[in-house]
Amino acid sequence: MKLKYKVLLALLATSSVAFAQTAPTTPAEPAAAETTIAYNVGVVSQYRYRGLAQTRGLPALQGGVDYTNANGFYLGTWGSTISWIADASASNKSITYSGGTELDLYGGYKFEKAGLNFDLGYLRYQYTGNDLDKKAGSNTQYANANTDEVYAAVTMGVYTMKYSYATSPLFGYVSSSGSAYTDFSANYDLGNGVTLTPHVGHQMVKGANLTYSTGGLSYTDYSVTFAKDLGNGLSATYAYITTNAKNNGNFLSNSTNYNSAQAANVIGVKYAF
């Protein structure tokens, strides 16, 4: 029974503070004044999402494209290399899972009202080739890892609050539809192209059995990120990321025993054009 919880935690190792630890951020900014298409590519020392490691502490290649209409509507896609699916395989290799790429598809609408900036949207996490639902055997707790979320964010000055709600099973756990992630962040301009972004988020996993001795699956993550604009579309980030689940055995990889909830220092470089 413990295996199913470890698999979900590996999947959760997939808020949004900086490109070094996130999928598309879709920040709640004012509607763009013109229609634009923007591209970005980058590399990070490890991929963290919602505080948890998704590449077992190893580097990841990432990139995306965003279309923003002058009326506030936007569409985008973002991808990253990942390793959590393989890491969720059984330690004795009796069960091995496939899928080494995350592709996110998202769209939404940004607008300003009463001095506040709002962002409403939809995000699809597509884990290409994942087979969690096909190899689970008699364990009916597994669903396909692909996940759908809707989200709403509001920004007032430098402060942003965002709420994300899973309309499908969350990252492969069949009973987890209705799980939610709430996060708060700030974006301080320190001058000379440097920004400071503190963040706290809480992942509530619906259906997690909190009577298990290892504490269930819901957790809180914390981070602080420094970003430096290097000019000509190039930027660099440093982030310190931790969680309150460092001692929760559910967050250990099945095949490697890697602790995806442990604290980490993450650096990254990105080029936007």
Image: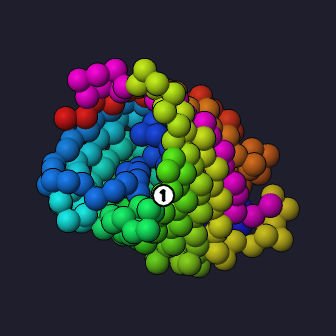
Q: Along the line of sight, which residue is nearer the eye, 70 or 162?
A: 70
Q: In the rendered view, would you say 266 is above or below 9?
A: above
- Judge from the rendering whether residue 12 lies leftward or rightward of residue 79; answer left or right: right
Residue corresponding to mark 1: 155
In the rendered image, is residue 58 in sight? no
- The image quadrant of residue 134 is bottom left
Residue lying at 41% horizontally and 25% vertically, measured from the top left: 193
Which quadrant of the rendered structure holds the N terminus? bottom right
Amino acid carrying label 1: it is Thr
- The residue positioned farthest toward the front in the image shown: 114
How many C-alpha atoms fall within 10 Å of the one at disc 1: few (<14), some, or many (≥20)? many
- Residue 78: horizontal and vertical position, in percent? 30, 50
- Judge from the rendering whether residue 55 lies leftward or rightward of residue 71; answer left or right: right
Residue lying at 49% horizontally and 33% vertically, measured from the top left: 189
| Residue 229, magenta (yes or no) | yes
Which quadrant of the rendered structure holds the C terminus? top left
- Residue 133: horizontal and vertical position, in percent? 45, 70
Q: Along the line of sight, which residue is nearer the eye, 21 or 210?
A: 21
| Residue 21, magenta (yes or no) | no
Which residues lie in the magenta part? 215-235
- Judge from the rendering whether residue 102 lies leftward or rightward of residue 164; answer left or right: left
Which element type, helix, strand or loop, lies under badge 1?
A: strand
In the rendered image, is residue 71 in sight? yes
Q: In the rendered view, would you say 158 is above or below 213?
A: above
Q: Along the line of sight, which residue is nearer the eye, 169 or 41?
A: 41
- Residue 79: horizontal and vertical position, in percent? 32, 48
Q: Along the line of sight, which residue is nearer the eye, 72 or 210?
A: 72
Residue lying at 29% horizontally and 22% vertically, measured from the top left: 231
Q: In the rendered view, would you say 192 is above or below 114?
A: above
* Color scheme of the displayed model: rainbow
- Judge from the rendering whether residue 72 lies leftward or rightward of residue 57; answer left or right: left
